[in-house]
Each structure stands twice: as structure tokens, then as C-alpha cells.
Image (cartoon, rainbow, N blue to C red):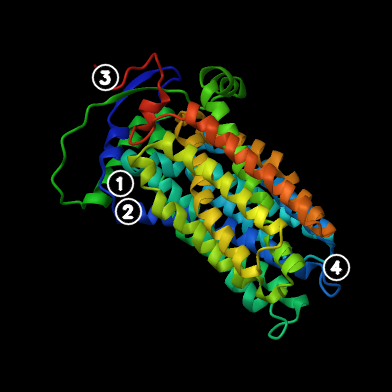
Amino acid sequence: MEELPVGTIVSTTVPPRLDRLAWSGWHRRVILALGITWILDGLEATLISAAGPVLTKPDTLGLTEGEVGVANGVYLAGEVAGALVFGHFTDRYGRKRLFLVTIALYLVSTALTGASPNLLFFSICRFFAGAGIGGEYAAINSAIDELVPARVRGHVDLVVNGSYWLGVAMGAALTVILLNEALLPHAIGWRLIFGLGAILGIAILRVRRDLTESPRWLVMHGRLAEADALARQIEEAVHGPDARPEPEPPPVRVRVSGAVGFGYVAHMVLSRHRRRAILGLVLMVAQAFFYNAIFFSYGLVLHRFYDVPVQHIGLYLIPFAVGNFLGPVLLGRLFDTVGRRVMISTTYVLSGVLLTLTGWAFANGWLTATTQTLAWCVVFFVASSAASSAYLTVSELFPVEIRGIAIALFFSIAAGASTVAPILFGLIIQSGSRSALFAAMCVAAALMIAAGLTAAVLAEHAEQKSLEHLAGDPGVPHPVP
């Protein structure tokens, strides 16, 4: 396959042809095959959250609440490592190659998790399962943005990222059965739930076999003939082989970059797109701390403060997950119509305010397990859209040649900074102090409010604009004059 030299400025109709496509069954199949990553991550997070109290039992691993928090932190550390390694590889070697490697790493690691004899083995397996999921983020987010038409990119991205909560609902349903000691001993049930996660991973491997490479990535690497042929295949899949050919849209000009080094990445992030980098970092860190703090300790809060039996925790997670999924589904379209800046800032600030009010009610003992869950459903209906918009922002505002590593970089910094959240909240819950837990909630809420105010100033009006337009290479006019 012939590649044009790095630095060549090429004229191509591939990006506008992809953007003008009607939403179709082909797009839905791609989104299903790729977006299932978030279902997996939601499943993983739920299993460990709901199983946390079970893992403290002497007939399982006999962990303390603090050790459960450490295991959660190790999983997040694995996500950081996986995102950085595979994020670099997806920019260098393509989106498609990473799809199978990362999911294979996940399924092997999560299967071994269910065979863990002690905390050390359990933590190592959780680390590599996290690495597989972290690696998925960069490749999948990049591919989705590069294949989805610009006019619906915001809504689709939010729904795909929000599908994390379908995994949460699945995990919650599984724990209701598998962590019910009347049906299965805890010593067996907690191991089976990780085995089922591996089975889901095998199913995804089969679904992804026929996925396409990103034509935009091929263009950026100077493989124009291959990109054009692939774009024609996609057009035929959308319109049918007998459809009347559409007139060529105005071409855009793109600078062939090939595989770039870390010096180039540093220049683009720290100099060329500094404002975008600040925005992405603030949004990612705030939502990561917010979610990791509350969600990873969800089961522990219900068990410690409301005496919810461990086999019933999944029942409380299901409505919580539904609220989180419905947020992006119902609010996502507004990110393409009302606009990015208004919606990102509003959802972030409102999430922080709502969590503060909920925490105040919790600290004063005004809530039951049911009303606590309902309150969190309201908070995270809004917060889920905010969190998903952080991934959208980082993905669409950086150019193709560094998109994967940019997503990985900001995700890794956010996940690394927020690793302390489940550990801190686990130790506070272990102490039984409502006031201390409320204070920690206020910290998470303040981060969200600060991020929302930052977005009100720095967020760009990226709605319905092509990725090439947003890349904004001053040396390459768009479209061709």
C-alpha cells in the first residue's frame, strides 16, 4: 500500500463524504460493536462495587473496606497504564488493530480475577483488566468520532459513553442472583460474576471481526487510495450498491502527518491547543473524581449506613443505572442543537449543586436507602451527560494524528488524579462518619462546579462542525478555494 511522504498536503473528499451520510443501519452496527466497551466497563465497575461488601466476608477474600478501596484504585491505575500504551499505538498503527488486542486482554484478566486466591492476585488481575478497558477508550472514541456524521456526533458520543450504565444495570441484575446466598454461597457467587464478564468479552471479539479501519486515519497517513476505496464501501453499505452516485462534495486539504512523536504531541497539547488542553483536563479530572468517589462506594454506603443486605444492593443499582443512561439519551441532542458550551457548563454546575444538596440531606439523616437512591438518580441523570461530554470534548477538539494519545493522556491524568477517590471514600465509610463523608462529597461537587465555570469560558462551539474544521491547521485552508 503506497503512502505519501509526511508533510504532503493532499486534497480529499473522504471526510465530507463521511459527514454527509444519512444515519443508517451500518452506523448502528459500528456503534454497537465499538460502544459495547462502555457496557463492559460499567459491568466491571458494578461487579466490584456491589461485590465489595461480599469480599469482606471471611469465606471469600476477607478484605477490609479499605482494601476494597485499594483494589478499586488498582483497577483505575490499570486503566491509566492501558490508555497511555494503547493510545499511542492506536495513532501509530490504526484504530482497527487495537480493537481485538485490548478486548482480549480484558477478557483473559477478568476471567482470572474470578480465580483469585488472595488480595495480591486479585489486584494484579484487576490491574490488567483495567489496562484492557483503558486501552479501549482511546481507540474506540477515536474511531466513533471519525466515522459518525458531524451533525449528530455530540448526541451519538454521549449515548455511546452513557451506555456504560447499561453495563451497570447488567452487573446489578447479575449480583442480585449471584450474590444471593440463598441461591449460591458467596464463596462461589462472586467468582462467577467475573467469569460471565469474560464470556461477554468473547462475544465482542466475534462482533468486531469485520469492523473497518478509520478512513480519516488512512488519509492522515497518506494512504489516499485505500481511504477512498473504504469510503466507497461505507457509502454502498449505507445507500446500497444500486443507489445513484451523489455529486462529489467540495474537498478539504489535509497535511499528511504519519506517525508522530511525543515532541509533536507535546507541542500540540501544550502550545498550539493550550486552551483546549486546559478545558479537557479540567472536565476530565472533575468528572472522574466525582464518579469514582460516589459510584465505587455506592454499595458500601448502602450497606454501612442503611443496613442494606449485600444480596439486595443490585436492586438499588438498577434504577441508579437507568437514570444515568437516560440522561445522555434525553439530553444528548441538545449538545448538537443548543450547543456544546451552554450544555457542558450547565450540566457540570447543576451536578455539583445537586450532589451538595443530597449530601446535606444524607449528613442530617433525612434519607432512607430508597430516597438516597432516588436522590442520586436525579444527580446522575445530569452528571452522566456532563461526564460523557468530557470524552466528547477531548476527542473532537484534537486532530486525527494525535486523537488517540490525546484521549489517553487526559483520561490517564484524570484517572490517576482520581485514584485517591475510592480509597478516600472507602476509608471514610469504614469510619462510619456521616459528616466526614459529606465533606468529601462537597469536594467532588466543588470540582464539578469549577469545571462547569471553566467550560462557560473555554468550551468551543463545536456542534455540527467537521473534525477537519475543528483541527484548524492554519497552513491548510478548508475547503479548497
Question: Disc 1 marks which amino acid?
Answer: Ile
- Marks 1 and 2: in contact by CB < 8 Å? yes
x then y, percent, for residue 452: 53, 36
- Marks 3 and 1: in contact by CB < 8 Å? no
Q: Nearer the viewer, mark 3 or mark 4?
A: 4
C-alpha gap between disc 2 and disc 1: 8 Å
C-alpha gap between disc 4 and disc 1: 53 Å
Tag 4 secondary structure: loop
N-term-proximal mark, 3 vs 4: 4
Question: Disc 2 marks which amino acid?
Answer: Trp
Tag 2 secondary structure: helix
Provide the residue designation for mark 2: 26
Q: Nearer the viewer, mark 4 or mark 1?
A: 4
C-alpha gap between disc 3 and disc 4: 65 Å
Query: 360 above or below 58?
Result: above
Residue at image coords 26%, 39%: 20
Residue at image coords 47%, 40%: 346
* Quadrant that contains the C terminus: top left
Provide the residue designation for mark 4: 62
Tag 3 secondary structure: loop
N-term-proximal mark, 2 vs 1: 2
Comparing 238 with 226, the one in front is: 238
Rate crowding at label 3 as few (under 14), some (14 to 19) or many (20 or more) other CA atoms within 10 Å: few
Disc number at residue 480?
A: 3
Provide the residue designation for mark 1: 234
Query: 77 above or below 103?
Result: above
N-term-proximal mark, 4 vs 1: 4
Comparing 297 with 15, the one in front is: 297
C-alpha gap between disc 3 and disc 2: 29 Å
